[in-house]
Image: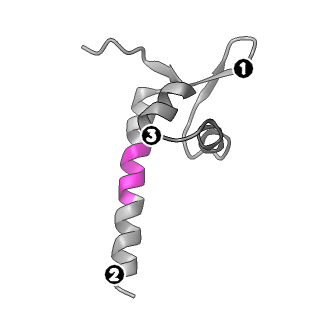
Amino acid sequence: MSDLPKFVPLEYIMAELSISKQQAYALVRSRVLRAIQVGGRGQWRVSLEELDAYIDRSYEETARFIHQDSNS
């Protein structure tokens, strides 16, 4: 069983995806990556399940893009 919690902060997402803080916030604000706000200061949390789903969707979009580009 994983030692990680069910929800992780955006800093975890940033490290896992090797992206900047601005990019992480942009994913959340655009609703590409679903997240919740918690606490009085509105800190963002993403479920690990959603992170995995986002990665899967990104692989699928990339495959479609590559396939479309190769048919041009």
- Look at mark 2 in the image and give the residue it sits on: 70
Residue, far left: 1
- Look at mark 1 in the image and give the residue it sits on: 42
- Look at mark 3 in the image and give the residue it sits on: 17
Position of the N terminus by quadrant:
top left
Amino acid type at circle 2 is Ser
| Mark 3, secondary structure of its residue | helix
The kind of secondary structure the magenta stretch mainly shows is helix
From this view, report whether residue 41 is shown above or below residue 53.
Answer: above
Q: Earlier in the sequence, mark 1 or mark 3?
A: 3
- Left or right: where 60 falls relative to 31: left
- Residue in the image at 46% along x and 32% along y: 15
Amino acid type at circle 1 is Gly
Q: Start and end of the magenta stretch?
A: 54-60
Residue 20: x %, y % from top left: 58, 39
- Residue in the image at 42% along x and 61% along y: 61
Q: Looking at the image, do the residues carrying marks 3 and 2 touch, with CB atoms under 8 Å apart?
A: no
For marks 3 and 2, give the one nearer the viewer: 3
- Residue in the image at 32% along x and 11% along y: 3
Number of marks = 3
